[in-house]
Amino acid sequence: MARGKPKEVALYRIKEIFYSLQGEGFHSGRATIFIRFSGCNLWSGISTERNRALCQFCDTDFLGVDGNQGGEYDAENLANLVLSCWPKEAPPFVVLTGGEPLLQVDDSLIATLHASGCVVAVETNGTLPMPRGIDWITVSPKAITKLCITTGNELKLVYPQKDLEPSQFEGMDFDHFYLQPIDDKQNPDSVLAAVDYCLAHPRWKLSLQIHKLVGIM
């Protein structure tokens, strides 16, 4: 009897994996394992190409697989590594981030993480389709892009962005709306601007990057 070709195992390119506190948005202060996926659809990650990027304020290194515990993993090995990083006092809270994680995240990975007892969250720019089964969806829109994810748990808008106003998103189906001041020397008053907007529009809440304030990853 002829044998079929062996099934190919998906490998996920990971920049880094680390255990820290979530520093932004609804889950600020929560113990979290971050899986940072390599690659993005809005910028190559190469500094000399930033002026051609759709997102020009990104402050994250997502290029390659050379970070802490970076590499290429199949779903099972990635889940086992997550479990090895967690103190085991509660279900692991895992954030899939990037770069843009939805370039790689699929149903198989989510199912494997769930089978390992993980609560799975994603941070995405919202321009790619969402796989099934994500427990917490955070969308962070960027200017000059079109959202294909218009429903979720949390919309977190870096503010201010040229040609992108918070009012554009208020009709979308999100549970929480956050403004996060842009960390940019060209916008030194971004915190005050975000505070003023939240005071004038109480539907929006202020999100500060507390991991930067306390000096952790």
Image (cartoon, rainbow, N blue to C red):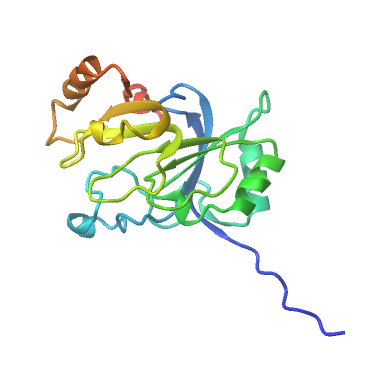
Residue 176 screen position, x and y as percent: 40, 25
Question: Which residue is outermost to the front?
Answer: 171
Above-or-below relation of 177 to 108:
above
Q: Is residue 92 visible?
A: yes
Q: Pick whichever, 26 or 74, lies toward us.
A: 26
189 displayed left or right of 154: left
Q: Looking at the rendering, in which quadrant would you find the N terminus?
A: bottom right
Q: Looking at the rendering, in which quadrant would you find the C terminus?
A: top left
Count the marks. Answer: 0
> Within the image, what quadrant is residue 164 found in?
top left
Q: Residue at x 40, y 56 (%)?
A: 39
Q: Is residue 182 visible?
A: no
Residue 157 screen position, x and y as percent: 30, 34
Residue 149 screen position, x and y as percent: 41, 45
Q: Residue at x 45, y 28 (%)?
A: 22
Q: Residue at x 60, y 62 (%)?
A: 10
68 displayed left or right of 93: left
118 displayed left or right of 129: right
Above-or-below relation of 65 to 188:
below
Residue 128 screen position, x and y as percent: 42, 53
Q: Pick whichever, 139 or 58, lies toward us.
A: 139
Above-or-below relation of 99 to 162:
below
Q: Residue at x 58, y 47 (%)?
A: 132
Question: Which residue is outermost to the right?
Answer: 1
Q: Pick whichever, 203 or 217, lies toward us.
A: 203
Q: Pick whichever, 69 or 156, lies toward us.
A: 156
Above-or-below relation of 1 to 71:
below
